Image (cartoon, rainbow, N blue to C red):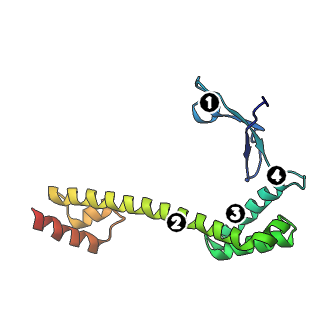
Protein backbone atom coordinates (compact mmCIF):
# COMPACT_ATOMS: atom_id res chain seq x y z
CA UNK A 1 0.00 0.00 0.00
CA UNK A 2 1.44 3.40 -0.91
CA UNK A 3 2.31 5.75 1.93
CA UNK A 4 -0.42 8.43 2.12
CA UNK A 5 0.64 12.06 1.83
CA UNK A 6 -1.49 15.16 2.36
CA UNK A 7 -0.81 18.57 0.90
CA UNK A 8 -2.21 22.05 1.44
CA UNK A 9 -1.77 24.65 -1.28
CA UNK A 10 -1.27 28.08 0.27
CA UNK A 11 -1.85 31.00 -2.07
CA UNK A 12 -0.77 33.82 0.24
CA UNK A 13 2.73 35.03 1.01
CA UNK A 14 4.90 32.45 2.71
CA UNK A 15 6.57 34.79 5.14
CA UNK A 16 7.57 32.68 8.16
CA UNK A 17 4.91 30.03 7.67
CA UNK A 18 5.85 26.37 8.21
CA UNK A 19 6.53 23.79 5.51
CA UNK A 20 4.24 21.36 7.33
CA UNK A 21 1.10 21.86 9.43
CA UNK A 22 -0.40 19.61 12.06
CA UNK A 23 -4.15 19.24 12.59
CA UNK A 24 -3.72 18.90 16.35
CA UNK A 25 -1.36 21.83 16.62
CA UNK A 26 -3.22 24.20 14.28
CA UNK A 27 -6.80 23.54 15.32
CA UNK A 28 -6.78 21.90 18.75
CA UNK A 29 -4.07 23.80 20.66
CA UNK A 30 -1.67 20.87 20.37
CA UNK A 31 -4.07 18.67 22.36
CA UNK A 32 -3.80 14.92 22.09
CA UNK A 33 -6.30 13.81 19.45
CA UNK A 34 -7.12 10.34 18.18
CA UNK A 35 -6.06 11.05 14.63
CA UNK A 36 -3.05 13.26 14.06
CA UNK A 37 -2.82 14.56 10.54
CA UNK A 38 0.15 16.39 9.11
CA UNK A 39 0.11 18.03 5.73
CA UNK A 40 2.93 19.42 3.65
CA UNK A 41 2.33 23.04 2.66
CA UNK A 42 2.99 24.05 -0.94
CA UNK A 43 3.86 27.70 -1.54
CA UNK A 44 4.67 29.68 -4.66
CA UNK A 45 8.07 28.72 -5.99
CA UNK A 46 10.30 29.22 -9.02
CA UNK A 47 9.01 26.03 -10.62
CA UNK A 48 6.96 26.29 -13.79
CA UNK A 49 4.56 23.49 -12.90
CA UNK A 50 0.76 23.49 -12.86
CA UNK A 51 0.54 23.87 -9.08
CA UNK A 52 2.75 26.94 -9.05
CA UNK A 53 0.78 28.42 -11.94
CA UNK A 54 -2.43 27.83 -9.97
CA UNK A 55 -0.96 29.65 -6.95
CA UNK A 56 0.00 32.60 -9.16
CA UNK A 57 -3.49 32.57 -10.72
CA UNK A 58 -5.00 32.81 -7.21
CA UNK A 59 -2.69 35.69 -6.29
CA UNK A 60 -3.62 37.58 -9.47
CA UNK A 61 -7.28 36.94 -8.70
CA UNK A 62 -6.93 38.26 -5.14
CA UNK A 63 -5.24 41.38 -6.50
CA UNK A 64 -8.03 41.90 -9.06
CA UNK A 65 -10.79 41.49 -6.44
CA UNK A 66 -9.06 44.19 -4.38
CA UNK A 67 -9.23 46.49 -7.43
CA UNK A 68 -12.63 45.55 -8.85
CA UNK A 69 -14.45 43.86 -5.97
CA UNK A 70 -16.21 40.53 -6.36
CA UNK A 71 -17.23 41.20 -9.95
CA UNK A 72 -17.08 39.59 -13.36
CA UNK A 73 -14.52 42.26 -14.28
CA UNK A 74 -12.16 40.86 -11.60
CA UNK A 75 -12.55 37.38 -13.07
CA UNK A 76 -12.10 38.38 -16.71
CA UNK A 77 -9.09 40.56 -15.84
CA UNK A 78 -7.54 37.67 -13.93
CA UNK A 79 -7.95 35.41 -16.95
CA UNK A 80 -6.55 38.06 -19.30
CA UNK A 81 -3.53 38.84 -17.09
CA UNK A 82 -2.73 35.17 -16.60
CA UNK A 83 -2.97 34.40 -20.32
CA UNK A 84 -0.67 37.39 -21.03
CA UNK A 85 1.83 36.10 -18.44
CA UNK A 86 1.62 32.54 -19.77
CA UNK A 87 0.02 31.32 -16.53
CA UNK A 88 -2.35 28.38 -17.16
CA UNK A 89 -2.45 29.72 -20.71
CA UNK A 90 -3.42 26.52 -22.50
CA UNK A 91 -6.07 25.62 -19.93
CA UNK A 92 -7.57 29.14 -19.95
CA UNK A 93 -7.57 29.23 -23.75
CA UNK A 94 -9.57 26.01 -23.88
CA UNK A 95 -11.87 26.65 -20.90
CA UNK A 96 -12.13 30.40 -20.36
CA UNK A 97 -15.93 30.50 -20.22
CA UNK A 98 -16.02 27.51 -17.87
CA UNK A 99 -13.50 29.20 -15.54
CA UNK A 100 -15.46 32.46 -15.57
CA UNK A 101 -18.73 30.61 -14.88
CA UNK A 102 -17.27 28.60 -12.01
CA UNK A 103 -15.63 31.62 -10.43
CA UNK A 104 -18.81 33.68 -10.76
CA UNK A 105 -20.77 30.87 -9.06
CA UNK A 106 -18.27 31.06 -6.19
CA UNK A 107 -19.08 34.78 -5.92
CA UNK A 108 -22.76 33.91 -5.86
CA UNK A 109 -22.24 31.40 -3.05
CA UNK A 110 -20.16 33.89 -1.09
CA UNK A 111 -22.72 36.64 -1.63
CA UNK A 112 -25.54 34.31 -0.56
CA UNK A 113 -23.63 33.48 2.63
CA UNK A 114 -22.91 37.16 3.33
CA UNK A 115 -26.57 37.99 2.71
CA UNK A 116 -27.68 35.21 5.04
CA UNK A 117 -25.35 36.40 7.81
CA UNK A 118 -26.49 39.99 7.32
CA UNK A 119 -30.12 38.86 7.46
CA UNK A 120 -29.48 36.90 10.66
CA UNK A 121 -27.83 39.92 12.26
CA UNK A 122 -30.72 42.13 11.17
CA UNK A 123 -33.21 39.66 12.68
CA UNK A 124 -31.24 39.65 15.94
CA UNK A 125 -31.22 43.46 15.98
CA UNK A 126 -34.99 43.50 15.41
CA UNK A 127 -35.56 41.07 18.30
CA UNK A 128 -33.33 43.10 20.60
CA UNK A 129 -35.15 46.31 19.67
CA UNK A 130 -38.55 44.65 20.22
CA UNK A 131 -37.52 43.50 23.71
CA UNK A 132 -36.31 47.00 24.59
CA UNK A 133 -39.50 48.59 23.27
CA UNK A 134 -41.67 46.11 25.23
CA UNK A 135 -39.81 46.94 28.45
CA UNK A 136 -40.72 50.59 27.87
CA UNK A 137 -37.75 51.89 29.82
CA UNK A 138 -35.86 53.49 26.94
CA UNK A 139 -36.68 56.12 24.35
CA UNK A 140 -36.42 55.24 20.67
CA UNK A 141 -33.37 57.52 20.49
CA UNK A 142 -31.66 55.46 23.20
CA UNK A 143 -32.63 52.21 21.49
CA UNK A 144 -31.21 53.58 18.22
CA UNK A 145 -27.91 54.14 20.06
CA UNK A 146 -27.96 50.54 21.35
CA UNK A 147 -29.03 48.98 18.03
CA UNK A 148 -27.27 51.14 15.40
CA UNK A 149 -28.01 48.75 12.53
CA UNK A 150 -31.69 49.81 12.61
CA UNK A 151 -32.78 53.22 11.37
CA UNK A 152 -34.95 55.47 13.49
CA UNK A 153 -37.80 54.99 10.98
CA UNK A 154 -37.50 51.20 11.35
CA UNK A 155 -37.66 51.59 15.11
CA UNK A 156 -40.82 53.74 14.86
CA UNK A 157 -42.48 51.08 12.69
CA UNK A 158 -41.34 48.39 15.10
CA UNK A 159 -42.73 50.36 18.03
CA UNK A 160 -46.13 50.63 16.30
CA UNK A 161 -46.10 46.89 15.61
CA UNK A 162 -45.13 45.99 19.18
CA UNK A 163 -47.74 48.30 20.69
CA UNK A 164 -50.50 46.80 18.52
CA UNK A 165 -49.62 43.33 19.77
CA UNK A 166 -49.50 44.42 23.42
Image disc number at residue 44: 4
Instruction: From the top left corner, tell me how far across and down residue 107 is, in percent.
Output: 58, 66
Tell me the element at label 2: helix
Q: Dividing the picture into quarters, in which one does residue 94 lie?
A: bottom right
Q: Crowdedness of circle 4 by 10 Å Cα count: few (<14), some, many (20+)?
A: some
Task: Tell me how far mark 2 sits from mark 4, CA to CA.
Answer: 28 Å
Q: How far apart are marks 4 and 3 (CA)?
A: 14 Å
Farthest residue to the right: give it. 47
**Crowding near the residue tagged with mark 1, few <14, some 14–19, many ≥20 C-alpha atoms within 10 Å:** some
Query: Under tag 1, what secondary structure?
Result: helix
Q: Quote the CA–CA distance across marks 1 and 4.
A: 25 Å
Q: For the residue labelled by badge 3, is the local secondary structure a helix, a strand or a loop? A: helix
- The residue closer to the viewer here, 149 or 56, is 56
**Marks 3 and 4: in contact by CB < 8 Å?**
no
Residue 16 visible, this orientation: no
Location of residue 157 (image quadrant): bottom left
Residue at the spot 54% in from the left edge and 63% down from the top edge: 109
The tag earlier along the polypeptide, 1 or 2, is 1
Q: Give the residue number, with chain letter if any, for mark 2.
A: 111
Q: In terms of depth relative to the viewer, which is nearer, 166 or 134?
A: 166
**Side (left or right) of 27 relative to 135:** right
Instruction: Tell me the residue that label 3 is attached to.
Output: 62
Q: At x 82% / y 58%, what residue is drawn? A: 53
Q: Which of marks 2 and 4 is nearer the N terminus?
A: 4
Instruction: Confirm whether residue 29 shows in the render.
Output: yes
Label 1, on which residue? 24
Amino acid sequence: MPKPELYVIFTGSKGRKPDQISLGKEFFDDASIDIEVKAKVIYESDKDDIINQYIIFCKVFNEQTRHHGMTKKAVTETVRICRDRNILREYLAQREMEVVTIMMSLFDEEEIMKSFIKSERHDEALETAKRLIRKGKMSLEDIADCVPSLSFDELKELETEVMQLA
